[in-house]
Image (tube, rainbow, N blue to C red):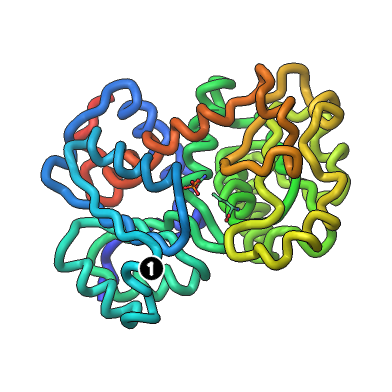
Amino acid sequence: MGATVRHLLSAGDLSGEEISFLLDLAAALKRRPQRVLEGRQLALLFEKPSLRTRVSFQVAMRHLGGETIYLAPQEVGLGEREAIKDVSRVLSRYVDIVAVRTWGQEIVEEYAQYSAIPVINALTNEEHPCQALADLLTVREKKGHLKGVSLAFIGDGNNVASSLLVTAASLGMDVRMAAPRGYMPPEPILAEASARAAASGGSLTMVHDPSEAVRGADALYTDVWTSMGQEREAERRRIAFAGYQLNAGLVALAAPGALVMHDLPAHRGEEITDEVMESEQSIIFDQAENRTWAQAAVVAFLLGAAHEVQG
Ligand code: CP
Ligand code: NVA
């Protein structure tokens, strides 16, 4: 068992100070990539498709002097071809760190219990902490700071929303979210985010009306209405989320020049219009780019190499 090994399974695993530290580390590595992980190996154990997460981890490891091994969906069969605890102990003997993209959060938690090496959550149904770090890095680059910046998430209380709420609230942001009834993030996430907002001098406001959430906001964020694995609910969700589209009408209610954000992949014409995605206000592709640097920081931090990075 890897009781003393540090993992990143959930946004709540990081304190506000650690999140700020990781953003500074990511910015330093972006300014000047440094080979602080020479000879280290990262396994990417993925049970769902990916463009950004896979490529950005691979590129990040290259920049740091390390290597990656990619295990595609169908290859390992976590808990199907082989017990989770066996896969975890075997990979611990080969590589230095592992990023796992899977279904339920309980899978990555069980995996980590048996891992002798750090485990990073590369997306579960419940959380996407690497995305949240890249998103905050991007907002900080654009606004110069995060404290007091208002960020409105419009749509599903999914993995992306949950990790974003917890991290943004930890850094004193004015966090708002509008979701239909029945689609808010889970209660423990809301409790964690609001406790962190109270401690950081930020705020958390949960509403059902999107126009209320976006009014005067500095940044607007949305994600798909139907996440991977929910495809059978797509029609029901299209109905529930009608009125939650990030479109020009909603953007007009935000602060002038408000940042438009999406983690991608986007379903253009559903949760966001083409026009808004292509607008000058969109920082969507900057978010995608910053996945590399946020994850470079996470890997360096978990492998104990952060102190070697020169500012
Ligand atoms: N945003 C994100 O995680 O994208 P992928 O699913 O392509 O990795
Ligand atoms: N909420 C989406 C995010 C994809 C990066 C999903 O889980 O499919």
| Residue pictured at 85% horizontal, 51% vertical | 208
Residue 248 relative to residue 199: left or right: right
Above-or-below relation of 255 to 158: above
Q: How many marks?
A: 1
Residue 288 position, x and y percent, is 49, 34
* Residue 7 visible in the snapshot: no
Above-or-below relation of 133 to 48: above
Q: Which one is in front, 24 or 74?
A: 74
In the picture, the quarter occupied by the N terminus is: bottom left
Q: Which one is in front, 255 or 287?
A: 287
Q: Dividing the picture into quarters, in which one does residue 98 lie?
A: bottom left
In the picture, the quarter occupied by the C terminus is: top left
| Residue pictured at 75% horizontal, 30% vertical | 217
Above-or-below relation of 158 to 257: below
Q: Secondary structure at mark 1?
A: loop
Q: Which residue is mark 1?
A: 74
| Residue pictured at 27% horizontal, 70% vertical | 115
Q: Which one is in front, 36 or 260?
A: 260
- Check disc 1 and give the amino acid type: Gln
Q: Which one is in front, 230 or 148?
A: 230
The residue positioned farthest toward the left in the image shown: 39
Residue 178 position, x and y percent, is 79, 47
User: What is the crowding at mark 1: few (fewer than 14 residues within 10 Å), some, or many (at least 20)?
Assistant: few
Residue 114 position, x and y percent, is 29, 75
Residue 86 relative to residue 286: left or right: left
* Residue 75 visible in the snapshot: yes
Residue 170 position, x and y percent, is 56, 45
User: Is the residue indicated by label 1 positioned so its CB lies within 8 Å of ligand 1?
Assistant: no
Q: Dividing the picture into quarters, in which one does residue 139 lie?
A: top right
